[in-house]
Every structure is written in C-alpha cells, then in structure tokens.
Image: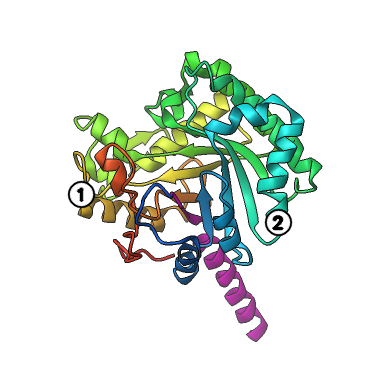
Amino acid sequence: MAIQLLLLWLLAASLDLTESQSVGVCYGRLGNNLPTPPQVISLYRSRNIRRMRVYDPDQGVFQALSGSNIEVMLGVPNTELQYVASSRENAREWVKRNVRDHSPGVRFRYIAVGNEVKASDTTLAPLVHPAMTNVHEAVAFHGLKDQIKVSTSVDTTLIGVSYPPSQGAFRGDVRGYIDPIIGFLVSINSPLLVNIYTYFSYVGNPREISLPYALFTSPGIVVQDGANGYQNLFDAMLDGVYSALEKAGGASLEIVVSESGWPSDGESAATFDNARTYYTNLVAHVAQGTPKRRGAIETYLFAMFDEHNKQPEYEKNFGIFYPDQRPKYQLSF
C-alpha cells in the first residue's frame, strides 16, 4: 500500500509539473522604462515562469538567461528573413552566433522563423519556407536537432472558414503560402506556432460573439459542433485551426499557442477587469486541452510587461506586470 501511495504521489506531482510548465510568457522589450534583463530573468524565476518567448536575439538577454533553466522560444525577426533565406551559410552563421554559442547555458526550445508574415506580403512571404529550411539545416549542422524545433508563428487571419470549428479551413488565397510550410513541419515533426486572440475576434464582431464566450466565463455550452461542445472562444479558434490543418495535410501536427492575451486599456472592451479575467482563466484552462485535442496546451501569454513604445494605444497595455515589476494580476504559475 505504501508503494502504491508513493507511485500515485509521484504521478500527481509529474502531472502538476507538466501543467505548470505548459504556460510561458512573451518577453517584449519595446519600452524605455523596462527592467534590465537580469531583473527580468529573476522575476521569471521568482514567479515560477519556466518558458519565455523572445522576438529577436539579444546578447544581454542571453547572458541573463544562462544557467536559469528557462526554456526559450527565439525568434528570427521578419527583418532577418532575407539573410537566413538567402544561403545555408548565412543560416549557419546566424544559428552559431545566436544559438550554439549560448547553448547549453541557454535552453533553446524553438526557433520561430518569422512572426505573422502575411501571405499577401510579396516581399516576406516567399522567404519564410526557405528560411525555415535553412535554419533547420543549420540547427542540425550545429548538432542541436534533437534539442530545438524550428517553426514559424502565424495568426488566425489565415483561416477563412472558422465556424463551426470542425469546418475550419485556410483561405484559398493563402494555400500557396501555408501548404509548403505545413508539409515541411510534418516532415520534421515540428509544431505550428499560432497567435490566438479572442479579444480581436470579439471586438471585430461583438454582435455574434458574446463577451463571456471570449473571456471563458460562459455558464454553459455556446456552440455545439457535432459531439463537441464549446464553452469558450479560445477552444473554438484553436480547434478551427486544427481542422484547417487536417484539410491541408497537417493532421499530425501539434499547435503551440505562441501568443494570447487581452489589453487592459486603450480600446473597446480593453479594461483591467476583462484582462484580469482572461489571463486568469486562460492559465487555468490550458492544462485541460480542447474538445478536439485533450491534453495540456503549450501557451505563451502576451506579454510580460506593458510596452510604452508600441502603437496603437491598446498595444501598450498587454502586460501581466507593470514595468516596475509589480504584478497587474494575481496569476499562479
């Protein structure tokens, strides 16, 4: 009996660890009043935040991260896509300088090659797939293939049909862009990174989408889709992307939610109470999975701090901490 109880305790502890580790926070730095990188890393560690997304390589951030045991999603900024897409040698140099030279002190988990590149962007869109290919090859060249997954981060504007979730499909005009990316991710067994914001869906269509549905506070099922019932918009949006992937040859792919958040000021429905409700419920919810895909959803909250150098006004107010490191909301990690 004692051995059985010990095994049950170890199982419960491992499940708690898995759930707590499923939530990370995006570390944006577009503010002139933000803490130093060492202060930021100390804050992550003191709050038990074990995963971080950074949008570009920064040597000061890498130095602060070294030895912290925080897992990192590192971005190849859109401004550097041309460089890494143009040759394998460039990609190898980029990965050496920004990844290999800091590993294993910094625990890199993903490299996100580009962020929310629009399929209609005739300059950047053709670069994403070759950039991903070159970066993946460079990761393997430097002996890091078993440690780091290569992907790209997209937004949900690529989805044309989104209701009900089972009918989710990519827009016809983006298939030429997204299909090669999906095929490549399938071939290397990497997840698709997706930025999901119920806030923008709600403010864009408040007549059809209720605020409780967007904030995880609906008292019951809002959308019944076959055997699956949806009580919140986050699950519906995520499962809509899964359905779109299935129709585009990506049924085997997992999705990592690379951003999700709610602004506390600056625009319609951007209030402190709404933001607190969204973040609190999101953190509690992602351990459960969606009606379509059970299991913890790896999710990155956007963002760590209010960033005063961003525009428009509401973009300044996505932080879960104030720049002086005070928490805006009482979130449990």
On the question of residue 167 being in view, the answer is: no
Q: Quadrant of residue 156?
A: top left
Residue 305, position as x, y percentages in the image:
36, 55
The residue identified by callout 1 is 271
Secondary structure type for disc 2: loop
Q: Nearer the viewer, residue 332 or 40?
A: 40
Nearer to the camera, 324 or 295:
324
Q: Label 2 vs label 1: CA separation?
A: 41 Å
CB-based contact (under 8 Å), mark 2 and mark 1: no
Q: Position of residue 129 (x, y in %)?
A: 64, 26
According to the image, label 2 marks what residue?
Answer: 103
Image position, residue 294 (x, y; %): 52, 48
Residue at (66, 31) in percent of width and height: 84
**Nearer the observer, disc 2 or disc 1?**
2
In this rendering, position of residue 174 left or right of residue 69 = left
Q: Main secondary structure of the magenta part?
A: helix
**Vertical relation: 140 (above or below) 16:** above
Residue 261 seen in the current view: yes
Q: Which residues are magenta?
A: 1-28
Q: Earlier in the sequence, mark 2 or mark 1?
A: 2
